[in-house]
Image (spheres, helix red, strand yellow):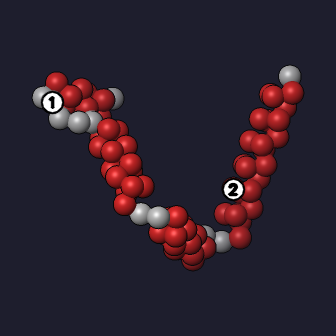
Amino acid sequence: MADNQNNNQNNSNNKMSYEEAGRKGGEKTAQNHDKEFFQEIGEKGGKATAQNHDKEFYQEIGEKGGKANRENRENNNS
C-alpha cells in the first residue's frame, strides 16, 4: 500500500514509477543486447540456483509446474 502511495506521489511530481522505470530499463536492455547475452545470463542464473538449492527444491517446482499445466489444460477443455 505504501509503495502505491509513493508511486502516486512520484507520478504527481512528474517522476516515473518503479514499474515504468523497470519496463523502460528492460526495453533498453533488450535493444542493447543480443540473444547470446540473454542465454549467458540465464545459464549463470541456472548454475547459481543449482548451487543454492537441493533435489527437493527442483521436485517441488516441477510438481507445481505440472499442476499448473494440468489445470490450464482442464480449463481450456471446459
Looking at the rendered structure, the kind of residue marked 1 is: Asn
Pick the front one: 29 or 17: 29
Reply above or below: 75 against 59. Answer: above
Q: Secondary structure at mark 1?
A: loop
The residue type indicated by label 2 comes to: Ile
Label annotation for residue 62? none
Query: Which residue is found at the position 12% from the left and 29% from the top?
Result: 13
Residue 7 screen position, x and y as percent: 25, 32
Pinpoint residue 49: horizontal percent, then vertical percent: 56, 69
Whichever of callouts 1 and 2 sits on the residue coming sooner in the sequence is: 1
Q: Residues within 10 Å of mark 1 (few under 14, many from 20)?
A: few
Does 64 sit left or right of 24 as displayed? right
Q: Give how far across and how far down residue 8 sits, in percent.
A: 24, 26
Confirm or deny contact between disc 1 and disc 2 (CB under 8 A): no
Q: In the rendered image, which quarter contains the N terminus?
A: top left
Residue at (33, 45) in percent of width and height: 24
The residue drawn where x is 16% and y is 24% is 12
Task: In this rendered view, identify the residue nearer to me: 71 or 16.
Answer: 16
SS for dot 2: helix
User: How far apart, in angstroms, are the residues tagged by discs 1 and 2?
Assistant: 41 Å
Asked whether residue 2 is in view, the answer is no
**How many numbered callouts?**
2
10 with respect to 57 (left or right): left
Q: Tell me the quarter of the image containing the C terminus.
A: top right
Residue receiving disc 2: 61
Query: In the image, 25: left or right of 49?
Result: left
Considering only vertical position in the picture, is 41 above or below 70?
A: below
The residue singled out by tag 1 in the image is 14
